[in-house]
């Protein structure tokens, strides 16, 4: 067990059982309860707990539950659940807090915890996770309460599906042909229930939850994990393809040609739809996004709000600034109407609605957004991140400099963002330019600068 190593910027995650095990999550759960009263939520002593399909998740659930009931808290046991379902349960049950047992998109050997307060308030590094880490690192014996809590199984899955169905009526749409890759994560049961009874042609790939993830990693950010989906979309001449990550809080889209659709383009499409009924509202976008994103938000009558990447940071900013919708390049989409949490199914509903109303192929719908040339994210392993950032800033000091998340430097016909990884000794580079020649030139210049000794 390596307690210090498993605390990340947004959650808790590590290899099981070498880095995270039952003892670790027991202590973290007690520390979570110590911290929870500082959030000033309801004192109902109920904690929602869900878990993904990893082989170690049930063992960790038992340890988390033992810790909670030992301090007179009741566990509202969701069972196997997606993280968005967990958020909905936490808010709908008005519980004091929640613990989701998952390592999200990580390989099978990993597991972890996502901690939340009342109304799904996210506990990240600057909103409580650092304090919980401090408490958990202290070796101590905490006596059990005289009266133990209970583990209460709650069966609200059908309620969640009905809630989602109430948001958009599929019956109003023209039938579409869709391929959905669940990656053997937790989303298979939700997708089957959601589309049941429709006359659409729906094909589900790897829908059975299997914590070994036998076909590919449940991480749609990696192109190699979309190979099967893209091939099937083209074979079946489908209208679109969809892929979820392991715990179901991220979604990736593929057009009818089998090409990936960037996450920031999806943000634009959804924002345009939301702004039709909510003109003048704020829309969040993050530092890696194309310039087309703020341009499109402004054109649609919205207010673009720039912020840092990272789902916990985004949720907090959206709450603080009352932002109606936000998107992250990695496939997280956040909705005020759901309690400022991410839900890929609501994002999917919007895309289906747009495809239905526009009556055009997905690739044609996205084509106007491909105004600029983008490098994609390039990672560099460096020994001294701060010195690299300083050197790059000095070199490009003639540009407009922003330090919202790492270093962003803007010029009239190109820009770049260089930011440190939250989990590894890496810097991550994104560049965008008006044409391919300029992009190649600036990419080479930055790569040489970052890697020079």
Image (tube, grey):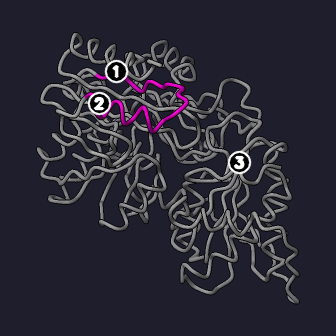
Above or below for 135 versus 402: below
In the drawing, does residue 171 fall left or right of residue 48? left
Mark before the other along the chain sequence, 3 or 2: 3
- Residue drawn at (57%, 38%) of the image: 245
Asked whether the residues under the numbered discs 3 and 1 touch, taking CB atoms below 8 Å apart as contact, a structural biologist would say: no
Quadrant of residue 248 within the rendered picture? top right
User: Residue at image x 68%, y 66%?
Assistant: 134
Q: Which secondary structure lies at badge 1?
A: helix
Earlier in the chain: of badge 2 and badge 1, it is 2
Q: Label 2 crowding class (10 Å Cα cut-off): few <14, some 14-19, many 20+?
A: many
Q: Is residue 250 magenta?
A: no
Nearest to the observer: residue 173 or residue 333: 333
The magenta-colored residue range is: 374-395
Residue occupying image coordinates x 70% and y 36%: 208
Q: Nearer the viewer, mark 3 or mark 1?
A: 1
Q: Which residue bears the numbered disc 1?
A: 446
Measuring 24% from the left and 12% from the top, which residue is drawn there? 436
Left or right of 175, for residue 203: right
Residue at numbered disc 3: 5
Q: Nearer the viewer, residue 1 or 138?
A: 138
Q: Looking at the image, is mark 2 or mark 1 nearer the viewer?
A: 1
**Badge 3 vs badge 2, beta-carbon distance below 8 Å:** no
Quarter of the image holding residue 292?
top left
Seen in the image, is 342 located left or right of residue 320? right
- Gap between marks 2 and 1, in whole Å? 9 Å
Image x and y of residue 313, in percent? 44, 56
Task: Check disc 2 and report the residue beneath it.
Answer: 416
As drawn, which residue projects farthest toward the top? 437
- Across and down, in percent, residue 441 comes to 26, 12
- Are discs 2 and 1 less than 8 Å apart at CB? yes
């Amino acid at each position: 067990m390596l307690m210090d190593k498993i605390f990340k910027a947004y959650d808790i995650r590590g290899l099981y059982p070498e880095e995270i095990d039952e003892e670790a999550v027991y202590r973290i759960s007690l520390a979570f309860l110590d911290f929870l009263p500082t959030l000033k939520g309801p004192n109902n002593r109920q904690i929602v707990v869900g878990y993904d399909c990893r082989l170690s998740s049930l063992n960790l659930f038992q340890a988390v539950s033992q810790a909670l009931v030992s301090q007179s808290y009741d566990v509202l046991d969701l069972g196997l659940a997606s993280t968005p379902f967990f958020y909905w349960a936490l808010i709908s049950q008005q519980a004091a807090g929640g613990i989701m047992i998952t390592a999200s998109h990580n390989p099978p050997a990993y597991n972890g915890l996502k901690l939340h307060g009342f109304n799904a308030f996210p506990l990240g590094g600057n909103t409580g996770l650092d304090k919980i880490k401090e408490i958990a690192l202290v070796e101590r014996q905490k006596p059990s309460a005289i009266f133990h809590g209970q583990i209460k199984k709650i069966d609200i899955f059908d309620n969640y599906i009905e809630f989602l169905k109430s948001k958009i009526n599929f019956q109003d749409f023209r039938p579409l042909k869709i391929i959905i890759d669940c990656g053997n994560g937790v989303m298979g049961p939700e997708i089957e229930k959601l589309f049941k009874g429709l006359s659409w042609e729906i094909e589900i790939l790897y829908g059975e939850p299997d914590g070994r993830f036998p076909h590919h990693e449940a991480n749609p950010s990696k192109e190699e994990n979309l190979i099967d989906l893209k091939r099937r979309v083209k074979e079946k001449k489908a209208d679109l393809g969809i892929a979820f990550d392991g715990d179901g809080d991220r979604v990736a889209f593929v057009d009818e040609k089998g090409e990936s659709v960037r996450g920031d383009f999806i943000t634009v499409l959804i924002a345009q739809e939301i702004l039709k009924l909510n003109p003048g509202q704020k829309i969040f976008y993050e530092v890696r996004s194309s310039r087309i994103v703020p341009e499109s938000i402004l054109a649609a009558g919205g207010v673009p709000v720039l912020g840092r990447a990272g789902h916990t940071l985004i949720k907090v900013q959206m709450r603080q600034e009352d932002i109606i919708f936000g998107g992250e390049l990695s496939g997280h989409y956040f909705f005020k109407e759901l309690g400022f949490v991410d839900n890929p199914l609501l994002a999917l509903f919007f895309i289906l609605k747009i495809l239905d109303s526009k009556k055009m192929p997905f690739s044609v719908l996205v084509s106007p957004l491909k105004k600029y040339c983008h490098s994609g994210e390039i990672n560099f392993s460096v020994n001294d991140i701060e010195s690299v950032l300083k050197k790059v800033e000095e070199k490009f000091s003639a540009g407009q400099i922003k330090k919202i998340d790492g270093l962003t430097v803007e010029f009239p016909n190109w820009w770049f963002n260089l930011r440190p990884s939250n989990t590894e000794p890496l810097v991550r580079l994104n560049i965008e330019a008006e044409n391919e020649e300029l992009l190649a030139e600036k990419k080479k210049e930055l790569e040489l600068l970052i890697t020079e000794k």
